[in-house]
Amino acid sequence: MAPDHSIAELAHRLPPARRRNHRHKLAALFLLIVLLLSVLAWPFVRAHLQAVAVLDLVANKPVPWLLHKTTTEPITTQDLTIPTSKGPIRARLYEPQNHPNAPAIVVLHGVHHLGIDEPRLIAFASAMSSCGLRVLTPELPDIKDYHVGANSIATIGDSAAWLAQNQAVTEKSQAKFYTAPASVPVGVMGLSFSGGLALLAASDPQWHHSIKFVVAIGSQDEMARVATFYRTGEDPLPTGASERLAPHEYGALVLEYEHLEDFIPPDQAADLAPIRAVLRAHLYEDWPGEKTALAALTPAQLTLAHQLIDTTSPITRAQLAHAETLHIEDMAGVSPHGHLKQLTTPVYLLHGAGDNIIPSAETVWMAEELPAASLQAELISPVLSHINLDGANPTAMDQWRLVHFFALILHAAESR
């Protein structure tokens, strides 16, 4: 039986020149493997660096010089009018200057009167675009006017379809070695209630093929459950437990504003316009305007206005409960609940742990219903409140999880 020799012994028996050549080949092979792994890993590493840059820019923090140079670029913006089945709407397109055929994503504003001109949305869309994406922010007229209604689902779907066709035209103009398709699916990211509506658009066959993936940030699963939370401070979880926290007045006030006729008796219809003006100014955080609107009220109207603004009042909460019974079908029409089991579109869910406008339990419900193959990532993060980066005392690991979540989105957007 031949003696058992180690690799080292065999290598030692080689002539010196052959040993050197052998070492050089091993070193070259090792370097080649490292190079290949680096090339394969770079897109994902770059996505994480871009995610750091995006979050820093959104938080109005300085981006480190080296990171800024390697991950961001100048952008251009263009105001547009795009056609939808609900009529033409305003939109804004953000594009990276150095990548005219960059991948595209739709970013939807939440319930806010400034719509696409809301400063946080502009900062976010600009940051995403500077990291190499074409970003379309369509204005949702109903959402802008504090109405969470089914009309916005069509506006979202039509906006995604418009961008998918525009993306195909853009890629065709840049293509040299392949024929671009007639439509290129795009990502859709919805903030607050718009995220739930984006999921409904993706579940509709009319728009399904235009939507590459959906990101829902701080969004509702079942509107009726959220409305109940505004009265009770409790949102049940799929486990049977409940998430408990004091609801922000904003949610209840949006429901009051949307259905003010439910809170004012029919024989007092003359009170609708002046009280709506007070609620509008309050929601807009227009304190001088609110003061002026209040000064124009009669004593009886003033009492009613103060009662409605006090969303913790037992009388107001009883009225909210009654209003819920009048709009059961409307609320079901803007709820992803029951529509997600068959959804094949990739979905990313993000929620603030301390969100008291739409509780994070809503994301847990969505994750519970979505097929495992569709749910790409779910994160309930203490870094966020509702859709702001102002969570209380997040740890370094919390920050990293949020960076990783956004890196997954950026990577998905850039994947062909």
Image (tube, rainbow, N blue to C red):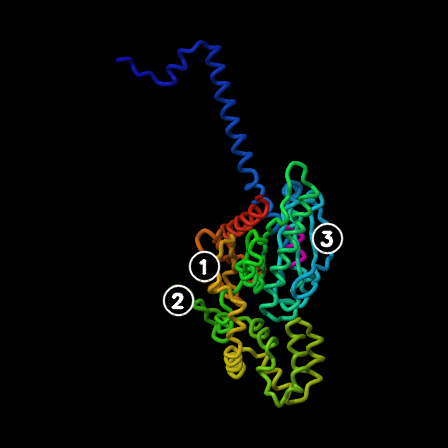
Circle 3 packing at 10 Å, graded few (<14), some (14-19), many (20+), is some
Side (left or right) of 326 relative to 239? right
Within-10-Å neighbours for mark 2: few <14, some 14–19, many 20+: few
Q: Position of residue 363 (x, y in %)?
A: 48, 61
Q: Which residue is mark 2?
A: 241
Vertical position of residue 416 compared to residue 281: above or below: above
Q: Secondary structure at mark 3?
A: strand
The residue most toward the left is 1
Q: Which mark is residue 304?
A: none
Query: Which of the two discs, 2 and 3, labels the residue nearer the N terminus?
Result: 3
Q: Residue at x 26, y 13 (%)?
A: 1
Mark toward the start of the polypeptide (2 vs 1): 2
Residue 108 found in image quarter:
bottom right
Choose between 44 and 200: the one closer to the eye: 200
Q: Position of residue 326 (x, y in %)?
A: 52, 79
Q: Amino acid at mark 2?
A: Ala
Badge 1 element: loop
- Which residue carries the number 1 mark? 341
Q: Residue at x 38, y 64 (%)?
A: 239
Are circles 2 and 1 on residues that touch, CB within 8 Å? Answer: no
In terms of secondary structure, where does tag 2 sit?
Answer: loop
Image depth: mark 1 or mark 3 in front:
1
Q: What's the residue type where badge 1 is placed?
A: Lys
Q: Please identify the quarter of the rendering in which residue 299 is found.
A: bottom right
What residue is pinned by disc 3? 77
Question: In screen coordinates, is 5 left or right of 86?
Answer: left
Please, which residue is most extreme toward the top here?
15
Give me the residue at 55% from left, 56% from top: 208
